[in-house]
Image: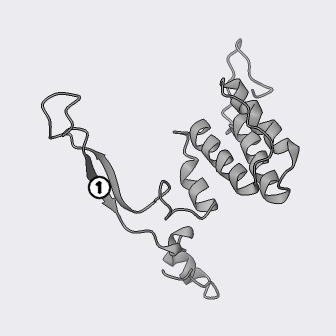
């Protein structure tokens, strides 16, 4: 809240604010520790804080770095769903072409035009909903706009653009 905010007389000052959840901080910290110091006990401590808060059992010690990485990624996917993190997480981890994280190619859904009742097997058959351009490594970078390239002749465009 801005220090000059008041109800009487009414004073409202609009200021941009960053909003970050404690769960995201815990997950970022656990992920960074897992990559820098595998086996650090604080990784499990912060990951288990999130799990016990939601009623899930704690993870047991003894997981390898890759197993812990998978657990952290799963927890991020669940905890931060519908908050816009997945797009950037997949690119940061460099797994956009892996199964379950694919960012291109066919995307599947249910066949809404088939079946006569809700539990009809034809209705639940997988159908391609839409197809996106296959993933290319150039998508890791956004291209420089042409006006920036014109303003600075020393600027070199990213490969593939």
Q: Residue furthest top?
A: 8
Q: Is residue 49 left or right of residue 81?
A: right
Vertical comparison of 10 with 77: above or below: above
Q: Is residue 141 left or right of residue 2?
A: left
Q: What is the quadrant of the N terminus in the image?
A: top right
Vertical comparison of 114 with 94: above or below: above
Q: Is residue 35 left or right of residue 158?
A: right
Q: Residue at x 78, y 25 (%)?
A: 4
Mark 1 closeness class: few <14, some 14–19, many ≥20 residues within 10 Å: few
In the image shown, does 143 or 44 lie closer to the viewer?
44
Q: Residue at x 87, y 43 (%)?
A: 41
Question: Dot 1: what SS?
Answer: strand
Location of residue 76 (image quadrant): top right
Count of marks placed on residues: 1
Vertical comparison of 132 with 44: above or below: below
In the image shown, does 79 or 47 lie closer to the viewer?
47
Q: Residue furthest bottom?
A: 153
Q: Position of residue 135 (x, y in %)?
A: 45, 68
Q: Position of residue 114 (x, y in %)?
A: 14, 40
Q: Residue at x 55, y 40 (%)?
A: 83
Q: Residue at x 71, y 11 (%)?
A: 8
In the image shown, does 70 or 132 lie closer to the viewer?
70
Vertical comparison of 119 with 71: above or below: above
Residue to which mark 1 is pinned: 130
Colour scheme in the image?
Answer: one colour
Q: Position of residue 94 (x, y in %)?
A: 60, 65
């Amino acid at each position: 809240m801005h220090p000059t905010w008041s109800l009487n007389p009414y004073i409202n000052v609009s200021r941009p604010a960053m909003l970050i959840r404690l769960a995201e901080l815990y997950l970022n910290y656990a992920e960074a520790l897992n990559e820098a110091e595998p086996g650090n006990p604080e990784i499990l401590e912060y990951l288990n804080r999130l799990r016990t808060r939601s009623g899930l059992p704690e993870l047991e010690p003894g997981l390898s770095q890759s197993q812990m990485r998978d657990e952290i990624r799963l927890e991020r996917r669940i905890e931060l769903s519908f908050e816009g993190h997945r797009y950037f997480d997949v690119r940061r981890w460099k797994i956009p072409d892996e199964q379950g994280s694919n960012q291109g190619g066919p995307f599947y859904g249910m066949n809404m035009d088939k079946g006569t009742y809700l539990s009809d097997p034809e209705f639940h058959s997988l159908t391609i909903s839409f197809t996106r351009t296959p993933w290319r490594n150039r998508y890791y970078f956004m291209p420089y706009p042409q006006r920036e390239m014109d303003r600075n002749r020393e600027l070199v465009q990213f490969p593939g653009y």
